[in-house]
Amino acid sequence: MSELGLRLRHLTFHGPQRLPSSVSFGPGLNVVFGASNTGKSFIVDTIDFMLGGRGPLRDIPERVGYDRILLAIETLSGDAFTIQRSTGGGGFMVFEGMFSTELPKAEGVQLSEAHSDRRAENLSSFLLAKIALSNRRLRKNKRNVTQSLSFRNLARLIIVNEEEIIQQRSPLSDGNYTADTANSSAFKLLLTGTDDSSLLTEKSDGPEEQGREGQISLLEQLIDELRGKIKELAGSPKELNDQLEKLENSIARQTNLLSVTEDDFKKSSSRRRELLRRLEEAQNRLAEIGALVERFSLLDQHYVSDVRRLEAIEEAGTMLTAFTGKCPLCGAEAEHHSPQDDCDGNVEAVAIAARAESDKIKSRRTELKSTIEVLQNEARSFNRRLPRLESELDKLSGQIEGVLAPNLRRMRATYSDLSDKRGDVREALNLHATLADYEARRQRLAAEGGELHDINSDVELPSSVTDKFAAKVLDILKHWHFPNVSRVHFDLKMRDLVIDGKNRTSFGKGLRAITQAAFTIGLLEYCRTNQTPHPGFVMLDSPLLSYREPDGPEDDLGTSDLDDHFYNFLANMPDDRQVIIVENNDPPKAIEVSRHAIRFTGTIGSGRAGFFQ
């Protein structure tokens, strides 16, 4: 059993107003499984971040309030230390001993984020020293220029996230063509224990080469930054283009629905305005009729009073005409009375005039009553129509406020969300386009300087070694009951496995995930068996994808027993190996109840809901 290696023990988030959130790991097999969106993949990203990854960490809501992370590690020889880092990134503090829920109180050692072979005060050099890989060199290009081994060269071979595990490229490639040579050199170092320190550079770098290397270095920094942003915001260009197409289709459908809903809203609003106008006009007219009827009723009372007065005059005149005494107007006796000469009054004429005036007023009163009756009929008509108008208005207002307006707001919000998502996807595609442009520029500069990756000549991987490695992978796949596997070899040109004559990258994503897992675990097994250097642990995110999201029938292992044999093989590995599996599907019962199996339920109040509880 090797005494060189590391074992992850505790990963803990701390915050001033937060209770610590922690997970623990032990020797051998560790499994984190359960519901989606509970922080399982976040654990993988965080461990990579704590081992020198630049990040940034995903900005998930549950992380708010936490400001530092602790990663406790022990060596196989018994030493223990804890790495502390801010959630915002930057440098590290390292403390002796293992800390989890309690923060270290002793003074630690500050280590920088960037690897350097000139100064040891950086995390990469610290970790490499723990596994006896200090001051190793890796071949960088075909001119035998070398670079210092960084722990990040090893991290990509031992930590495989859910995106990398299904990539259609060699496990030794991260898409950075100029880094492929160094990646292959790191692979050779683990297989053979031999680095490239003995290589002699063919020629020294002149000013032109130095300028070119400076440009390449700057481009690589920009590329790393873009990759960090892309990792945080986006998926692959194909996924983004598919997503953009779906968003465009959704936006088109939403636009049509929104147009129809807006038309319905406008029509209903216009109808409501029309009803309000008619109701207001009817109410105004009804009020006007009420005022007119009131005035006309008062006028009728005056007419009644005038008729009564004229009837009294007429009656009095009739009585006076029959009177034989003195004249009531001039006081003359009847026999001496001469109306033409002595009396201005003509009682009979007054009576006749009063009767005529009375008849005229009665005629007017009749017309007035007819007018009042017309107005009252009009008022009754309005009183019948008003409740119907009010009812229709209330019903329409209820439909507008209760159905149409909320639907319109929801549709506008949905349209806005879709537009925002489309903008995010386009931004991500622009980042990919910018990344591709930077990589193309870097490739051109590398080609001009003779540094372009040449898979045929850059790194010499002895076939005797790669054959033994391939045999180890074949043995693992057979133990896992990988379907119909009989031959595996390592293609020196492709820097990848060929399984039964088929390139590993030609399988569906589910089987690519399993074979990537076999590559990673096979490397750990080979190094431990042959006593070559290895960090001692591996971490795999979603290796059993073919059980969950197969590409097709050939990629679907849902009816096979590969998962049982996968877990059983890992559970029986010696304690100087540590394997951490992150999966959605539940492992076999015997694994599920083991001490180092962690289940996230996704439901608060039922077990452990997620990483942040």
Image: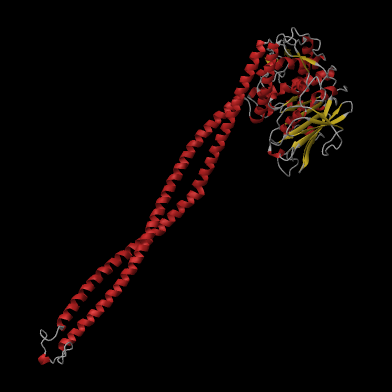
Q: Determine whether, in the image, residue 235 is placed left or right of residue 6.
A: left
Q: Quadrant of residue 229 in the image?
A: top right
- Quarter of the rendering occupied by the N terminus: top right
Most extreme residue toward the front is 207
Most extreme residue toward the right is 78
Work out whether residue 511 can be spotted: no
User: Looking at the image, is 182 positioned above or below residue 126?
Assistant: above
Q: Determine whether, in the image, residue 457 is placed left or right of residue 578.
A: left
What residue is shown at x 44% (from left), y 54% (from top)? Answer: 393
**Residue 141: % across, % down:** 72, 12
What residue is shown at x 12% (from left), y 91% (from top)? Answer: 334
Q: Quadrant of residue 80 in the image?
A: top right
Display coloring:
secondary structure
Question: Residue 422 versus residue 402: which sits nearer the camera?
Answer: 422
Work out whether residue 369 can be spotted: yes
**Residue 434: % across, % down:** 61, 23
User: Looking at the image, is 613 positioned above or below residue 158?
Assistant: below
Q: Determine whether, in the image, residue 341 is placed left or right of residue 560.
A: left
**Residue 438: % across, % down:** 63, 20
- Quarter of the rendering occupied by the C terminus: top right
